[in-house]
Amino acid sequence: CRASLEVQDSTSNRTELQVHGLSETVVGVLGGGQLGRMLCEAASQLAIKVVILDPMENCPASNLCHYHMVGNYDDSATVEAFAKRCGVLTVEIEHVDAATLEKLEQQGVDCQPKASTIRIIQDKYLQKVHFSRHAIPLPKFVQIDDLEGAKRAADLFGYPLMIKSRRLAYDGRGNAVAKNEDEISSAVNALGGYARGLYVEKWAPFVKELSVIVARGRDNSLLCYPVVETIHRENICHIVKSPANVSWKILKLATEVACKAVSSLEGAGIFAVELFLTADGQVLLNEVAPRPHNSGHHTIEACFTSQFEQHLRAVVGLPLGDPSTKAPAAIMYNILGEDEGEPGFLLANQLIRRALRIPGASVHWYDKPEMRKQRKMGHITLVGPSMGILEARLQSMLGEETKDDQ
Ligand code: ATP
Ligand code: MG
Ligand code: MG
């Protein structure tokens, strides 16, 4: 579906064409990474047409979408041209041009979730201000502009000091930790300096990280997926376990906090609410993503309606599906790049070949053209009769290389 001139011309009035599927609304997605790719996979089942805007010609979604416009989703003119092809505009990444979305909304373009939501969420400091105004529990935080400000924050919060970039953060790439005063400057430099726009969060001494995927329909109805536990490696989501092994009381509290957070934002679609569980039973909000999320990948195999299908249903205005699980347990394992280039591909390939032999395992490979260390290249979902059995299967999958791998 990569763009040729002919294809561009023949699709330029997509919204006016008859689409004989479940919905005649063409879904435009800003971003064509793995989330866009999995949206396209879900769309194909419902014969919903998805068009993608992404600067990379061979981005993961490019081969699966109805049409791929090659261009920047943070460029105003490009987003405006793209919007003309879509019945509804949505995102698979929050780092898009919110001002353009606001302008398009004023012109009558249907953005789901709303531009106001993207504006709040893409700036993690503004996001914290927003949620604290809505009385959502979260770690204390303060904006910092210089070393003196950082030291004052450390006096308030103590060490370790979690310093975060306000914008363009993902996979922990906007986070740096200072263990003491001497480390503040190097941590700030690692984030690109104070001019980049930084803030500090009080360290959250969590015993577990939890996540709740929440879907909101166009009628504002909310549905929550069962609470999951997320396990991060070097700030990057690595493993997701569903359901989370916490008390009924914590499940209820996590779901309540997630619903309250999403209720404070506008628009339809999937929202992921990342949470910290502390030893004394508090549930604190870490951040919200206004789109399908890594902590919901298991829903493809483990739930009646995946987060991707749910997002499409929500934004085009179809009835929301059942978010409950169809299997007692699921584990999602991210295939993160272990090495650069060919050696990295070889290691991933060996892991995948072991996974293909595991009962109940489904492999997802995102077809990214370049392998880089710590990059999310794919994921494997294990679904089975109990968490104990799945943990044993995960260990055997991660175990020693078998003869066949060599
Ligand atoms: P994502 O890829 O989820 O968007 P991100 O780059 O926005 O990640 P965060 O979610 O802010 O980063 O943080 C990544 C991880 O760092 C968290 O999941 C958690 O493990 C750790 N972390 C973040 N904030 C804190 C905190 N205040 N105290 C302790 N650990 C934290
Ligand atoms: Mg984030
Ligand atoms: Mg996060």
Image (spheres, helix red, strand yellow):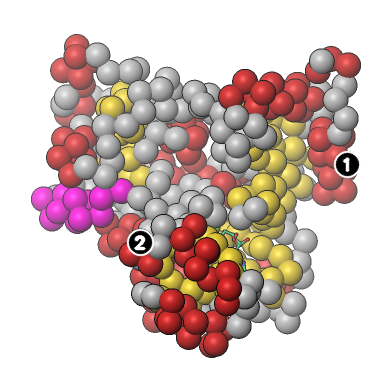
Q: Is residue 10 magenta?
A: no
Q: Is residue 406 left or right of residue 152?
A: right
Left or right, 145 with reference to 363: left
Q: Is the magenta region chiefly helix, strand or loop?
A: helix
Give the extent of the magenta segment: 96-107
- Residue at 88%, 16% in the rendered image: 403
Instruction: Report the residue marked by disc 1.
Output: 392
Q: Residue at x 75, y 23 (%)?
A: 350
- Residue nearer the viewer, 49 or 106: 106
Q: Would residue 253 appear left or right of 368 to someone viewing this image?
A: right
- Report which residue position mark 2 lands on: 196
> 230 above or below 384?
below
**Disc 2 from disc 1: Cα separation:** 44 Å
Mark 1 is surrounded, within 10 Å at the Cα level, by few (under 14), some (14 to 19) or many (20 or more) other residues, namely: few
Q: Amino acid at mark 1?
A: Ala
**How would you rate the neighbour count of disc 2 (Cα within 10 Å): few for under 14, some for 14-19, many for 20 or more?**
few
Residue 184 bears which disc, if any? Answer: none
Query: Residue 143's spot in the image, x, y percent?
Result: 40, 76
What's the residue type where badge 2 is placed?
A: Arg
Whichever of callouts 2 and 1 sits on the residue coming sooner in the sequence is 2
Q: Does residue 185 appear in the picture of this structure? A: yes
What residue is shown at x 54% (from left), y 50% (from top)?
171
Residues under numbered marks 2 and 1 in contact, where contact means CB atoms less than 8 Å apart = no
**Looking at the rendering, which quadrant does residue 46 occupy?**
top left
| Residue 254 visible in image | no
Q: Camera-side residue: 329 or 175?
A: 175
